[in-house]
Image: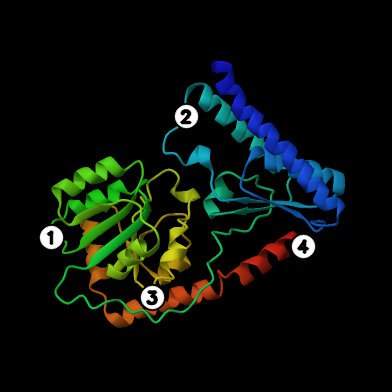
Amino acid sequence: MLATSLNLPLVKLGIRLLTSLYHGRRMLRRGIGRNGIIVYSLHTPYVAAALWLKRLYRVPVAVFIPDLPLHMSGKRSRGLHGAIKGLDDRLLRHLMEKVDFAFPITEGVARSWLPTSLPYHVVEGIAPVFVPSSRRPRSRGQARPRILYTGSFSHIHRVVQLFAARPDLDAELVLVGGGPDLEALQQLATQDMRIKIKPFVVGEALQREFDAADFLINPRDPQWMGAQFSFPSKLFDYMTRKLPILSTRMPGIPPEYFNCFFALDEQDEIALATSLEKALAAGSSEIEARIAAGERLLSTDKSAKVVGARILKALS
């Protein structure tokens, strides 16, 4: 059983390497991809296959790097698993010295992990097709403003804890999703009626949560060791929802996004309360201006057309 558990991952890696080589060579022989090979995700067999094909067909290779798993978990793997992960990380660094271009998701990935001589262009993502909406933030009246988070409960506990430490904040925090922080968040919710925990939902049920919200929030902890390597993809979705967005200043979020977002200061509960109260007190004109700035960013600089053109220019 021990041999089986060790061998299966190696078998899968080998299969991925062989299938990548087979399909890649087949396409290149048909003349498809002669301008370059783009590898999506920093995965050893895919990068290795692309480099072998580069050597055979003399085509440039570029690699997208959406994350760095070894450096984002918040804790180091130990034992045999940790040793294998460390070996894979060193192998990937060696392979990346032979590629022609990289597209890291954040500047932190480029500074901390890429070879210094490797040219790169940061691509935090490609915005979904943006359809302008006539939706306006609902009139809150006398009700508490409702702040919504959707997604993985990972590295968000600290910010929620700071919120709970200030019972004077007159707002409701609704967290929809699940993940490693779930138990700790549920414990906070039992002690603070302003915090609501709900399971993952999709479709109409998810849309109802957005319809009931006044603000959307990205509470990811900037002190998390992986924050410099991460750009939360949910932010693109949030920016299409015609709602104001609150976000911590994660190192992986470029500064221009904070023309669209209200920045949260998570240094301590006083700083969080001050920045949150300032955002909640914003007038409708400021809110609409920030929403409009987000729409412009999505439909221009982050659109598929613009980002695709930059990728092609980098390869050429």
Give the residue type that dot 1 points to: Asp
Residue position for label 4: 316
Sequence-first disc among 1 and 3? 1
Give the residue type that dot 4 points to: Ser
Residue 211: x %, y % from top left = 31, 70
Q: CA distance from mark 4 to mark 2?
A: 39 Å
State the mark number for residue 145.
none
State the mark number for residue 290.
3
Q: Secondary structure at mark 4?
A: loop
Residue position for label 1: 168
Residue 248: x %, y % from top left = 35, 58
Q: Residue at x 27, y 40 (%)?
A: 183
Give the residue type that dot 3 points to: Arg
Q: Is residue 85 shown left or right of residue 59?
A: left
- Labels 1 & 4 near each other (Cβ < 8 A): no
Sequence-first disc among 2 and 3? 2
Numbered marks: total: 4
Q: Residue at x 16, y 55 (%)?
A: 166
Sequence-first disc among 4 and 3? 3
How many other residues sit within 10 Å of disc 4, few (<14), some (14-19) or many (≥20)?
few
Q: Say above or below: 15 vs 263.
A: above
Q: Say above or below: 2 vs 156.
A: above
Residue position for label 2: 77
Nearest the camera: 18 or 167?
18
Nearest the camera: 271 or 123?
123
Q: Quadrant of the C terminus?
A: bottom right
